Amino acid sequence: MRRWLILGVGSAVILLPLIVWIALPETIVLTDFVHRGGSIYLKNVSKYFLLFLFFTSLFVGATIVFLAVFLVVRKSYLASSGRKVRSIEQVYLLRVSELLFEEPDVPGEQLEEEMRALAWRDMVRPRVFELRKECEGASIRRLLSRRALREVLWRMNSDLTGETRRRLAFMLEDLGFVRDSVRELKDSRWWVRARACRALGMMRSKEGMFPIIGLLEDDEEDVRNEAALALIEIAGVSEALDPILSNVKSISGWMAIRLSGDIVRLGLESAPHLLKGLDSSSEKVQEFSIRMMGQLKDISVVPSLLNKMDSLTVRLKAVAIVTLGKIGDYRGQPVIERYARDKRDRLRIAAAEALGYLGALNTLPLLEEMFLQDWIDVRLVAAKAIAQFGSIGKKKLQEYRWRGDSLAKAIALQTLDELGFIRPPKRSTFVSTQRIV
Amino acid sequence: MKPLILVVEDDEITSSLIRFKLSNSGYDVVVVGDGTQALEFLKTRTPDLILLDMMMPMMSGKEFLLEFKKLPLGVKIPIIILTAKTLEKDVLEGLALGADDFMKKPFSPSELVARVQTVLARKK
């Protein structure tokens, strides 16, 4: 884009004085002044001055146009130089492999892994800096070399674990690739920031961690997603969850899916981090944290969740009520029962659902009350909750098929049908009554 | 004489890393790009161990193992399979088809050498 802008400006610089010179000579102030009363000397000066101005503009404009064309051609060449890059990659593959597997010559006892990696770094540093010098600079050859070297290192990075990977991380830092990506984190273009996050995640450099945490509050969703992923790559799920849930501006659906898998794998260890998410300023982060608490069913979060209830919005309260039901802790039951009588429909619906998850027999009368007397949406949810009480719940619904108001009968029948408790009649026998399984 | 290891791996970065590490650890290494080339190689030389990637073009690791079993020297050469993290079923299939050990990718080269040493020691 910049190249085209330069091209445009250059063309304008060439054309403008030309247009003025050819089309509007009479309006030039100097010429006019000369006609009215200036001397012959002044007339010549003005003419030569204008000539000078014209040719200077022409020269500057031509230079700008040439520069723009050069940059465009250069960029095209770089983009299409894949084959050249691959041949350079072969060379760097050998050199990097030699460096990676060289062992520090340390006499005496065996070093710990971390210390050995540091000893290796000191040993190979001069040669790594040589590599760096080969790739620094703006010439096409050096740019291609840098690209090839980076490609080799990134691909190795994804194949390796353990000490060798730590060595690779050191190489990436010493070669300046980490620094380049950290610099790109501040770019005004969102796709550059996102790409830089991804690169830092791939390089797993701890140097990039703190700048990436700042990007969790970025305005662009893609940047936030890449930043979260990068943090997980660099620090691991357990370490990354805290900064993610505390700082992220908002959680997208995609990020929620990605994080939920990691949280489920982490298990109960993630509960303290989810509590941090509960205190987030973003409602989406709070909602995500509350829902995940319900997935994990960790009773240790119940006190914090109960304390937080009053300060939550109605929507989040509803989510929290269902979560309390899913967790199934006795401490949640009085709160759920209280909300079962709340004047807000949304909260009563959530309470009915929660009572179904809770499965406490002493709450069945309350559920029946909601099923028989409440508003239709609440009754539908209450019916499904009753069905979760196993054979007792099924029996209750079968009773309500025949007693209660017409709506109760219809809802009971629908619920039994949805849950597969009603077998449809055989077509060949034309039986008009339905047999209940 | 150094033990000979046949590496059957199509990715050049991975095969280069393995070759370097094993060579530095005192092994002779030959790298081929797929199962077909590996079978051709086995007609001329007998390696002490085979490192086999499961995901390859032309002939996959599983197909190679099936063909390998039919060879007369099939029983004598130990095999370590290399597989990506998500393809656990490949591990189970490979072990069922006669592989002696497996390594998941991404892998630690040091761990790979340790497994090679263990498998070779067991073979002796």
Image (cartoon, rainbow, N blue to C red):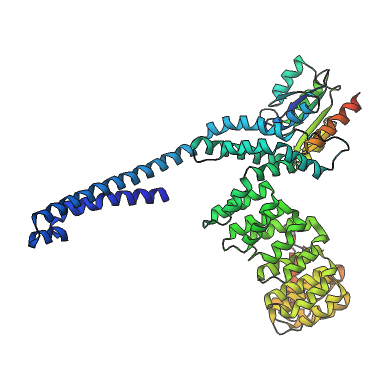
Figure quadrant of residue A239: bottom right
A89 lies above or below A12: above
Extreme top residue here? B44
Q: Is residue A284 left or right of residue A370?
A: left
A83 lies above or below A260: above
Figure quadrant of residue B82: top right
A303 lies above or below A104: below
Figure quadrant of residue A263: bottom right
- Near-viewer residue (A205 or B13): A205
Q: Residue at horizontal 77%, vertical 64%?
A: A273
Q: Is residue A354 left or right of residue A156?
A: right
Image quadrant holding the C terminus of chain A, namely bottom right
Q: Is residue A141 left or right of residue A378?
A: left
- Near-viewer residue (A261 or B114): B114
Relative image position of residue B86 (x, y in whole percent): 74, 44
**Residue A351 visible in rendering:** yes
- Near-viewer residue (A403 or A347): A347
- Near-viewer residue (A244 or B66): A244
Relative image position of residue B77 (x, y in whole percent): 84, 23
Relative image position of residue A392 (x, y in whole percent): 87, 71
**Residue A147 visible in rendering:** no
Relative image position of residue A247 (x, y in whole percent): 67, 65
